[in-house]
Image (cartoon, grey):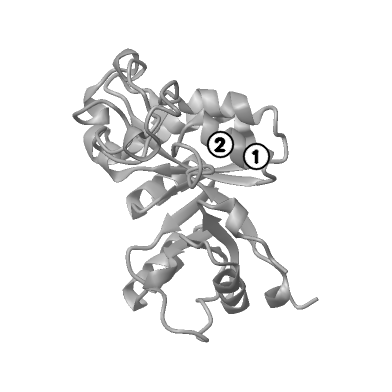
Amino acid sequence: MNPAQETPRLVAHRGYAARYPENTLEAVSAALEAGAQYVEVDIQLSADGIPVLFHDADLARTTDGAGQVMEHTLAQLRQLSAGEPARFGARFAGARIPTLDELAGLLEHWPDATAFLELKEESLARFGTAAVTEKVLQASQRLGGRRVLISYSGSAIAEIHRHGGVTSGWVLRRYDEASRDQASALAPAFLICNHTKLPPPPEALWPGPWAWMIYEVTDPGLAMKLRQRGARYIETMDLAAMTFR
């Protein structure tokens, strides 16, 4: 079969985030139980330097707390519900902000699963690129080759490469020639982009030493068109919607 005709590999974006609170162990577990072999989560650091699964800098959207995640210790974050009350009410009130170490422990029960770990720029700016990268590598060490460290930050990709033996993915802000030149210089294993930033079809995605991963897609027809253009991986929050026929 022509590779462009194969179905893309699905990556559970922030876990099974369409049906469960994003970046929680509940969302990741549900994605794995639904058959996902790839999950993507976001990593911020707590005030005491512990990598936790969290997307925003601010706590308000997905928890019952307030303020910056980086200004709270892990013990303080543990007191919050991460059940997205604005979206789910009290249904997931018991959900908590998990640590990266806890995610690694969960994935020990799913030996075929790979985790994409996004180093968030707010924590990179607060604690420094080298420090955040080191802490994420330490906390995810038992995942070994089943982890991919990704970031919008080119400096973070370069820092990941300095450690050697760790797979990286660069998230594009823009799909333009300047980004293409930077991608060639960084040479990550993955290039990651929002599908709305891509040029109109049928233009093929840039060839290179990378695999393309495109987000946020909940339409299997769109996913197949992206696969035909060169996207091997598709990120989705709604695994149930992505049924290929």
**Quarter-wise, where is residue 199 in the image?**
bottom left
Q: Residue at x 50, y 58 (%)?
A: 188
Q: Residue at x 37, y 71 (%)?
A: 197
Q: Residue at x 28, y 38 (%)?
A: 61
Q: Locate the N terminus and report the quarter of the image it occupies.
A: bottom right
Per the image, label 1 sits on a secondary structure element best described as: helix
- The location of residue 120, given as percent across then percent down, is 34, 43
Q: Locate the C terminus and report the quarter of the image it occupies.
A: bottom right
Is the residue under label 2 in contact with that under label 1 (CB below 8 Å)? Answer: yes
| Side of 42 relative to 121 (left or right) | right
- The location of residue 208, given as percent across then percent down, is 55, 71
| Side of 152 relative to 141 (left or right) | left
- The location of residue 32, given as percent across then percent down, is 65, 39
**Quarter-wise, where is residue 92 in the image?**
top left
Mark 1 surroundings: few (<14), some (14-19) or many (≥20) residues within 10 A? some
Q: Residue at x 26, y 41 (%)?
A: 122
Q: Residue furthest top?
A: 75
Per the image, label 2 sits on a secondary structure element best described as: helix
Label drawn at residue 28: 2
Mark 2 surroundings: few (<14), some (14-19) or many (≥20) residues within 10 A? many
Q: How many marks?
A: 2
The kind of residue on which mark 2 rests is Val
**Residue that carries the numbered disc 1 in the rendered image:** 32
